[in-house]
Amino acid sequence: MCGIVGFTGKQNAAPVLLEGLKKLEYRGYDSAGIAVRDGDSAPVTVKEKGRIADLKDKIGPVENIVGTCGIGHTRWATHGAPSETNAHPHHSDDDAVIGVHNGIIENYKELKEMLIESGREFVSETDTEVAAQLLDSNYDGDPIKAISKTLSQVEGSFALGILFSDREGEIYAVRRESPLIVGVAEGESFIASDVPAIIKYTKNYYL
Ligand code: GLU
């Protein structure tokens, strides 16, 4: 089932994301990762096969990942073996779009072929990377327009958490027949696959 967590606010995002992912462990997973950005700097992504504890070991001291906006993921592999490369978050090849994904993009093969023909390079076997690249190919500075166009092209059931590199402090989320909630607190916003990931911070959430 995998888990998605996203946070934007005033506190450091990495501990919120790692703690949230831990609360979603019950959903099962084979790898985990986070992408965090500091202001308008490029998001830093760290991912690892195995447990959240392995990801934490790889990150080291939490001060290694500074930033108040980010997304995190625990993956249950459906497209591509459990591996660091296939773990989320996934970047478009120019790093303009970074995404985490729960579910399946059913027509990912056709979309991937189309994107490769247009010159895009892929590093993973996942359908998720296809979604990130497709979002980027549809992006002209308007995230909602890019997401709407992408939704008209993808088939399947899924939830996505998305960062656009040029949209500081913003997280975008969309879902189709997969769970994803939005939480709101004073000066902070969250996304999550389930309530336990954010309940410590807010009881004000939308299903
Ligand atoms: N289909 C995606 C993958 O294989 C997401 C799987 C999940 O929901 O964790 O990477």
Image (cartoon, grey):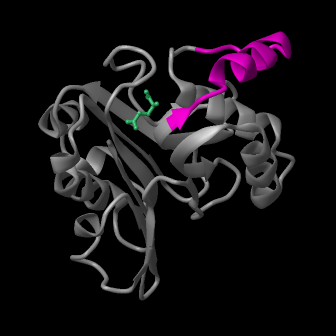
Q: Position of residue 30 (x, y in %)?
A: 24, 28
Residue 95 lies left or right of residue 136; in this view the side is left
Q: Position of residue 188 (x, y in %)?
A: 44, 78
Tell me the magenta residue range.
104-122
Most foreground residue, 44 or 182: 182
The quadrant in which the C terminus is found is bottom left
Total label count? Answer: 0
Q: Residue at x 70, y 37 (%)?
A: 154
Q: Residue at x 40, y 24 (%)?
A: 78
Q: Residue at x 62, y 15 (%)?
A: 122
User: For residue 148, which quarter of the picture?
Assistant: bottom right
Residue 20 lies left or right of residue 124; in this view the side is left
Most foreground residue, 127 or 141: 127
Would you say residue 116 sits in the magenta stretch? yes
Q: Residue at x 45, y 20 (%)?
A: 79
Would you say residue 125 sits in the magenta stretch? no
Q: Is residue 154 above or below residue 121?
A: below
Q: Position of residue 98 (x, y in %)?
A: 57, 40
Residue 109 lies left or right of residue 144; in this view the side is left
Q: Is residue 69 above or below residue 34?
A: below
User: For residue 112, which quarter of the picture?
Assistant: top right
Q: Position of residue 116 (x, y in %)?
A: 76, 13
* Quarter of the image where ligand 1 sits: top left
Q: Is residue 68 above or below residue 25?
A: below
Most foreground residue, 116 or 71: 116
Most foreground residue, 185 or 114: 114
